Image (tube, rainbow, N blue to C red):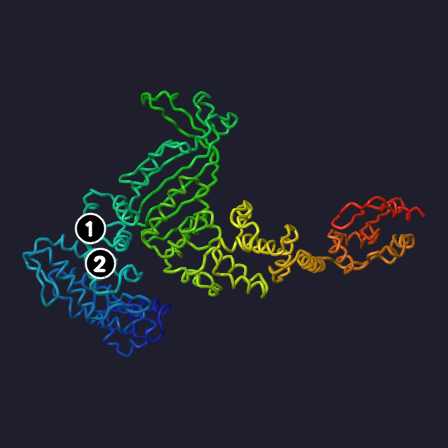
Amino acid sequence: MRKGQEKLIKRAEKLLPKEFVEKLMDESFTIEQLESLFRWMFWFKDCPEILDDWDTFCQDAFSLKHVYAITGDWQRTHELCTYMKEKFHGCRYYVMDDYWQAFAYRIYSAKKDDQYLFNKDDMTHILDYIRENILCNDYSDCKSSKDFLGVSDEFSDYSDFMYKFIKVNSGIGLALVLIEEGTCSKDMDEILRIIRLTSQMVNGGMEARARCYIKAGITDEEWIQYEQMIENNVFNRNIVAAEIAFKYYPGFKDLIDSIMERNDASLYFISNELGNDYSSGRINLTNTEFVEPIFNTCIKLDCAKFGSENIVSVNEPAIKFSWKITFSGIFLTFRKYESTAIYNAHSRDDYNYGDEPLYSCRHDGRTKLDRTYLFTNDYSVLMQIPSEKWVPAGFHTVNNDARKGRSLIGTILSWFFQRIKDAKGNVWKDIITYSVRDYDLLPAFTCNEITAGHTLNEVMNTHYKNAGFIDWNRCDLRLGYLIMQALPLVNEKSRNFLLANKYMSFEEFMKTYCVHAKRIYIDPEIKRVNSRRYVVKRFLFEIIQKRIGADIDPIIYDYIDMSEMLHRKISIMFTSEKKVNDAHDDLAKELTAKNTPRVKVPKNSKFNRLAKLLPDDMEWIKSKKRLVQEGSEMHNCVASYVDKINNDSCAIYSFMYNNKRYTIEFVTYKNRYSIKQLYGVCNSEPEEGVEDYVKGFLAE
């Protein structure tokens, strides 16, 4: 056996099944043929059926210069090889044969969702179209033939023609990518159109531009025009990207111009940069309401060197707004700095701008807001998180950023969402009908969910599993969402009450069933706590307070909080203050008992003698149950004294005096008993004479 064959077999033994290796031991094959067989057998090592038709397999492996194997599918590969041998041969230039084979391979092996996209008839139709309408169309001395494509002996544009083949090959590959990802439909006319257009694109970023062109719905003429402008350096890619983006967000230039021309009391224009045709830019603005400098901040800001007479304003917030347009969409970056100083640049030696004031800015680097958004060309809204990943932007996040940025950021973001609403309508129209102050009461959607939905019902039922209790297209979204969050927390009777009123307007419900309706959505604590749960609990609190007609905020809050901690259903159907207090006390007992350790007074306690000094109506509390009860009924923290009791550091007593109940803590000091604490209900001070009454027994 030849050395080359032996080496090949050693390689095959590591990679191929035994029965495949045996085929490579045939010495009738040349080394080159064996190499071809090894390569092909590797592609189909999981297809033992190739051994059943070995001669055919060998013919395919030897007849094609390049390996066009559809991995793991020998039958389809054989069909492709047969097709290639019949169609592509006899061209004057063999490279053309190779390209036609590459075209066929790309088309016949294309898949989407594990299904082949084209059969042989489809492939022939596409290749015929390429030959007649893309390749031959531009060359008068190029002719079609039974060999699929040949050229005359006098053909003079070989290099240009080969370049055309290269472009078509790239165009087919790009078109198939767009089909597989769903950007382009599987309609044959659309496929042929995309292949024709992508074959005329300028290299570099073709996929992103093609995807953008298709989504923008531009005409064939505009597509070709943009590509020619890029090729001729009339347009650069950024300007073309901007032109496309402006089809989605018309009026963006006017928005930027309006910001740059602002001249009101709250914003002062510091500096700007503007890219070609608004494809990128930056605007810095600062608040100049106060012009008196606070000089002790100058050192931190490194502005003192300009001299106090040159400082216009110090310690003012500044906003940096920048944008960049690519084929992905419009990137917006907002940075709000906590502390800045604005200084007059007249002091600079190189200043030569006449009488026009020139200002510049320094900041200390600390930001209250640092956010980058991407408004894509299909109206998706993404934001960049600290890990630099892009995630769908939450509607509440956008709203909060707009508030932090005051009028500038709010103006810009509102403008973009107005464009999205105009383009997509549907759910955005329902959302934007609510005022900005109500946005905190709306569901925690992402902006993309709102854009994709056709109705509120569709969006809510997609996002929430428990949203089917109401027709969201009919209800007030604010009230419906509050009720949806409250239903899992309340008991059956309360649930029925909420469901019976689910189609009331938010304002009507608040006026009828809540005491301080405005607290639900303008209470500043909502912003501080930043919790959806807080809003719901406040909603339930307001209903309870309205029903009982009493202002007992701490008791109601405690009742709701303890119900949640103990996983008890909340009732909002109380009819009196007493019933709320009783429910509160029951929960307090249960919660205290759950968290209170066992009480075990030592047998030889040093307080045993005290029990003999005190009258029988003074109760020495020696059990966990009784200690928890005392704490609950007297509204004090005596249950937390378990460790002191068990360590024999104190003794807790309860007694009545003039029909009033008191709790006492006794301690010892130098072998004498003394009163450390003596309080009534809710730690109230005892009436006059109570302490002397108790001390009288200790003196005995």
Name the amino acid type tagged 2: Ile
Estimate the x, y position of residue 119 in percent, counting from the top left: 23, 71
Residue occupying image coordinates x 16% and y 55%: 164
Q: Quadrant of residue 142?
A: bottom left
In this rendering, the answer to whether 104 lies above or below 557 is below
Residue 378 versus residue 287: which sits nearer the camera? Answer: 287
Residue 159's tag is none
Asked which secondary structure carries label 1, the reply is helix
First in residue order: circle 1 vs circle 2:
2
Estimate the x, y position of residue 606 in percent, counting from the top left: 88, 52
Q: In the rendered view, does 145 fall on the left or right side of 459?
A: left
Count of all numbered marks drawn on residues in the image: 2
Residue at mark 1 to residue at mark 2: CA–CA distance: 14 Å
Asked which secondary structure carries label 2, the reply is helix
Residue occupying image coordinates x 49% and y 56%: 479
Label 1 crowd (10 A; few <14 / some 14-19 / many >=20): few
Residue 396 versus residue 587: which sits nearer the camera? Answer: 587
Estimate the x, y position of residue 677 in percent, counting from the top left: 80, 46
Residue 222's tag is 1
The answer to whether marks 1 and 2 mark residues whose Cβ atoms lie closer than 8 Å is no
Q: Quadrant of residue 75?
A: bottom left
Residue bearing mark 2:
194
Name the amino acid type tagged 1: Glu
